[in-house]
């Protein structure tokens, strides 16, 4: 033991431990960066972990079991994420674990050095090395910002699941009658508007023909014909827009059904 301490072998061991801790912090930063990129598009992401979270969240509402605390749901799934069998929380806190171990081992070695009556130079080297190790660990956290990325990932996931997906699933599975009533009212209002426009235009055209009567000057006849043609074109455009809107709505529902069948 005395020879091990005297030859500074303990310093080499602590150097390797600190380097490993910084390497784990780097891996954690890379993983969090990838998850942040994937969390920006949760419905279309290819990340299996986020897809599983999305599927489980949606399955709860399909079973009429609403999730009242999405924050706890997201936090629980983040705690279950592992990289090489190591959880993200462990990778995030490697600097704390390493700092505690290095500090405890260094203090113990200094006590042993005093017991073995090592020179003062030996004690100063160990003390200064401990300070350097702690500074390296702090610099690693400032450089990789693992904890900041974790908080940002949690915020992005919580924002989507709580403010977007939860409201959508509640309307779709918990309150379907209200959604159908809203859709029916919306489409009925559009149809009534189109009918009112047609009913208003028909008396105007009839009145114009009665007003001018016969005979009608050629220029005036051309003007009336152009107005009637424009009115007919407007009616055709409105009808086409209504058909396109109805077709687009039908296509959206069909795509949603296909996605549900594909993933569930």
Image (cartoon, rainbow, N blue to C red):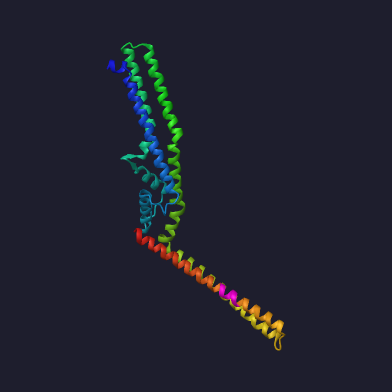
User: What is the chief secondary structure element of the magenta stretch?
Assistant: helix
Q: Position of residue 239 (x, y in %)?
A: 54, 74
Name the residue furthest left: 1
Residue 205 placement (x, y as % from top left): 64, 81
Residue 69 appears left or right of 211 = left
Hey, which quadrant is residue 105 in on the image?
Answer: top left
Q: Is residue 188 visible?
A: no
**Residue at position x 41%, y 65% from top?**
254
Is 194 contained in the magenta span? Answer: no
**Residue 7, image quadrant:** top left
Q: Position of residue 120 (x, y in %)?
A: 38, 12
Which residue reaches farthest bottom? 215
- Of residues 28 and 112, the one nearer the viewer is 28
> In this orientation, which residue lies closer to the viewer: 159 or 10?
10
The residue range painted magenta reads: 232-237
Q: Is residue 242 above or below residue 220?
A: above
């Amino acid at each position: 033991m005395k020879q091990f301490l005297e030859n500074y072998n303990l310093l080499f061991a602590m150097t390797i431990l600190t380097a490993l801790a910084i390497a784990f912090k780097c891996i954690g930063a890379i993983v969090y960066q990838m998850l942040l990129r994937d969390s920006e598009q949760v419905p279309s992401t290819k990340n299996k972990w986020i897809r599983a979270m999305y599927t489980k969240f949606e399955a709860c509402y399909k079973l009429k079991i609403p999730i009242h605390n999405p924050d706890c749901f997201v936090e629980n799934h983040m705690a279950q994420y592992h990289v090489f069998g190591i959880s993200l929380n462990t990778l995030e806190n490697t600097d704390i674990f390493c700092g505690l171990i290095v500090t405890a081992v260094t203090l113990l070695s200094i006590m042993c050095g005093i017991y073995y009556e090592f020179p003062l130079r030996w004690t100063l080297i160990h003390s200064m090395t401990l300070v350097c190790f702690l500074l390296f660990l702090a610099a690693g956290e400032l450089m990789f910002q693992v904890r900041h990325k974790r908080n940002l990932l949690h915020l992005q996931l919580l924002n989507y699941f709580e403010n977007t997906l939860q409201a959508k699933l509640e309307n779709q599975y918990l309150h379907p009658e209200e959604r159908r009533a809203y859709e029916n009212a919306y489409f009925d209002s559009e149809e009534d508007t189109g009918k009112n426009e047609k009913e208003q235009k028909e008396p105007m055209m009839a009145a114009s023909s009665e007003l001018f009567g016969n005979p009608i000057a050629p220029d005036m006849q051309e003007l009336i014909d152009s107005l009637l043609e424009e009115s007919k074109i407007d009616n055709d455009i409105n009808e086409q827009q209504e058909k396109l809107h109805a077709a687009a709505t039908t296509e959206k529902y069909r795509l949603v059904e296909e996605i549900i069948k594909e993933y569930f």
